[in-house]
Image (cartoon, grey):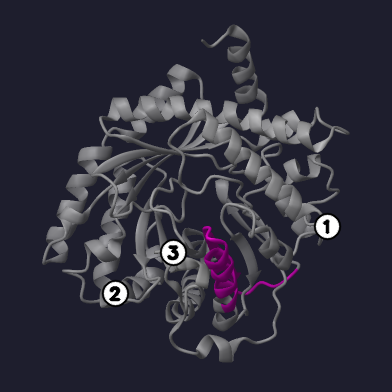
Amino acid sequence: MININEVFETTNMIEHENLDVRTVTMGISLLDCADSSVEATCQKIEAKIKKYAGNLASTADQMAAEFGIPIINKRISITPASLVGAACCKTPEDYVTICKTLDKVAKELGVNFLGGFSAIVSKGMTQSDRLLIESIPQALSETDFICASVNVGSTKTGINMDAVRLMGETVKKTAEITKDRDCIGCAKLVVLCNAPDDNPFMAGSFLGVTQPDAVINVGVSGPGVVKAALDECHGKDFQVLCDTIKKTAFKITRVGQMVAQEAAKRLGVPFGIIDLSLAPTPAIGDSVADIIEAMGIEKCGAPGTTAALALLNDQVKKGGVMASSYVGGLSGAFIPVSEDAGMIAAAECGALTIEKLEAMTCVCSVGLDMIAIPGDTTAATISGIIADESAIGMINQKTTAVRILPVVGKTVGESIELGGLLGHAPIMKVNNYSCEEFISRTGSIPAPIHSFKN
């Protein structure tokens, strides 16, 4: 039974500690929308998305009002578009047409983002995959709500270095074509290794082929709640620290579990998973960096930061899995620089560097996320950064990702303002020594020995 003290506690977390359900994401399979013509495929895509998600936004808003729990984003994820368009798309422009259809539907339904303009190329690229990747710069420049992702590696398959090289070039082209908007297209493009197929968070959200026709996945968030709890732990030992995070994560996840089950019931689709991730925002008091500093690190990025993040990630998972039997997605702590007020401050004062962020990605949920870099950074250097992150994911059997913005016309010491949840980003220094010869090699990096488990 829920007692009155728990009700008061949850109310306080919502009103004063930035507790929210970050996203209710409906996954929709579009495999049966494939057709021999682009026009017919687009018609089927529009009809199926509207069939399942027509009431998604209004239902989430109604639940938020009834329960008093903020539901920040309503999102849709789809089957990777390179699979849906394989039969009909003969040029990159055909994929741009599909992307515009998806954007039109997202706007009509009132959702915040639609993810799944994606290709899974960890072992190799089909012609359809290549066409979709080639379409990404134009597609993201001519749409508003679409997110694109490309999975270039996995622990089981290794890293497709041809795809890594191509994605470095794609990120550069996307930055160039959206340079009049501070390269916003790159904020909607992520390159992954070991991408999960039930992730409700953008920009890497898509619906895997093993999933049902439609499913509800929910992402909860509560960095401010964890920070407030840790403020009571100064001087306490690690056991108290861990138990406090674990208990807090349990409470946060229970809120998400309730919202997820009720949303699934009202929308008439199955409940999939809860993603336990602590997802920050640019708002003061809603920062993962602040949690790390509350543990006793003077500034995020100082020695001890990686250990503190590892502790946080592990305890969030341990508390969350006790609150829900269906946990998935990424589940841990996000460290997007532009979307976290504490990370922004740490980067601006020099405490946090890209190299330190790379070390932190070994123990967190994702990877190098929402990092602005000088616009003259080469495509090969971007590919090298993607390769490094993919190697961390492949070897450690975890998801890693790169969402990086080479801001055309700007350099270290300047910043960009993206607005909303995407926040504000200082331009961070990149190691300029060349990896061109390495990236120019063709083929793949083989899967590690520990991938052979059959």
Q: Amino acid at mark 1?
A: Pro
Give me the C-alpha separation between circle 3 and circle 1.
Answer: 36 Å
Q: Viewed as shown, does residue 370 lie left or right of 244?
A: left
| Residue 315 visible here | yes
Name the kind of residue labelled 3 in the image: Lys
Which label was assigned to residue 65? none
Mark 3 burial class by Cα count in 10 Å: few <14, some 14-19, many 20+: few
Q: Which residue is mark 1?
A: 303
Q: Is residue 168 magenta?
A: no
- The nearer-to-camera label among 3 and 1 is 3
Which residue is drawn at the image coordinates 46% and 55% (left, top)? 203
Which mark, by number, is residue 92?
2
Task: Give how far across and how far down residue 412 sits, in percent.
Answer: 73, 70
Q: Residue at x 73, y 29 (%)?
A: 229
Residue 299 placement, left or right of 201? right
Q: Is tag 2's residue or tag 1's residue first in the polypeptide sequence?
A: 2
The quadrant holding residue 208 is: bottom left
> In 3D space, how far apart are the residues under numbered discs 2 and 1 (Cα atoms)?
46 Å
Q: Amino acid at mark 2?
A: Pro
